[in-house]
Amino acid sequence: DADVTQTPRNRITKTGKRIMLECSQTKGHDRMYWYRQDPGLGLRLIYYSFDVKDINKGEISDGYSVSRQAQAKFSLSLESAIPNQTALYFCATSDPTGTSGSYNEQFFGPGTRLTVL
Amino acid sequence: AQSVTQPDIHITVSEGASLELRCNYSYGATPYLFWYVQSPGQGLQLLLKYFSGDTLVQGIKGFEAEFKRSQSSFNLRKPSVHWSDAAEYFCAVGVRGTYKYIFGTGTRLKVLA
């Protein structure tokens, strides 16, 4: 079973629609992240959360919002989707209590491919 | 500002040939460095990481990377590439004090049979 799951895997929507991408994890990690990947731009951080009461904006948070419903769930919303939000979206988790301290690896979900027409 | 540069967008090698993917970083302190691989339709998987100590680190799938502070580089290498190594590779830096990660733009590897 996958440790980090994302739903849906693919979504096509229209400009102006509200859409939610969901992420669930069974790794027991406190830290969760949302990234978007665009060709030639790598991964860019949208939002991150260190626990259910600690949510922070990343470098490209405009047009997005998030909700940390529980330690295991972190949702990304596009309130009014626009075409330049067409991208591949990744959720990731990390565990700060590992043997290497606070900069352990991140574990990624399989991604959600979002197309906004 | 911290940044990660992967100068090669695409690299093509023949199966069995050696591979080196370049990564340069801009960071004011000792960096935490990572290499991830993304196979088609998949999420990112960690290949290896460097935090401190021995500057040559070994990873999964026969990959290794060498940290060179004087060159601000963390290049990924593999002595003999397999067709299954075709993927996109990302270098990343962990930013101290923020618990965030900065990713390079990626290098897409094509392997010729």
Image (spheres, grey):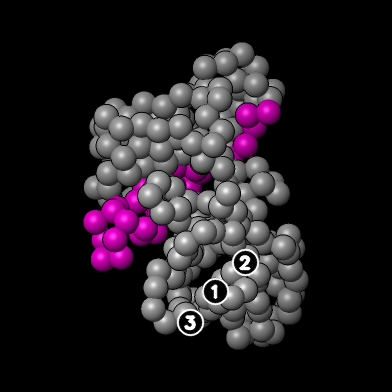
**B69 relative to A48 in the view: left or right:** right
* Residue placed under numbered mark 3 in the picture: B56
Residue with the most extreme front position = B28
Sequence-first disc among 2 and 3: 2
Tag 2–tag 3 contact (CB < 8 Å) = no
Q: Residue at x 39, y 73 (%)?
A: B52
- Residue placed under numbered mark 2 in the picture: B23
Q: Quadrant of residue A74?
A: top left
- Mark closest to the chain's N terminus, 2 or 1: 2
Which residue matches tag 1?
B69
Q: Amino acid at mark 3?
A: Leu
Instruction: Please tell me which residue is depicted at 62% across the width and 49% down the height of the picture.
Output: A42
- Residue A94 lies in magenta, yes or no? yes
Where residue A116 appears, as percent x and y from the top left, is 65, 25
- Given residues A46 and A113, the one toward you in this image is A46
Q: Is there one chain holding both mark 2 and mark 1?
A: yes
> Do the residues marked 1 and 3 share a common chain?
yes
Res. A23 in view: no
Q: Tell me where residue B94 appears, x and y as whole percent.
A: 45, 56
What is the three-letter code of the residue carrying label 2? Cys
- Secondary element type, mark 3: strand
Q: Is residue A114 above or below residue A91?
A: above
Tag 2, which chain?
A: B
Neighbour tally class for label 3: few under 14, some 14-19, many 20 plus, Cα within 10 Å: few
Alpha-carbon span between mark 1 and mark 3: 12 Å
User: Cβ–Cβ below 8 Å for labels 1 and 3?
Assistant: no
Q: Is residue A108 magenta?
A: yes
Q: Residue at x 27, y 37 (%)?
A: A51
Asked if residue A46 shows in the view, the reply is yes
- Please tell me which of labels 1 and 3 falls first in the chain: 3
Query: Pointer 2: residues within 10 angstroms few (<14), some, or many (20+)?
Result: many
Q: Position of residue B107 (x, y in %)?
A: 67, 61
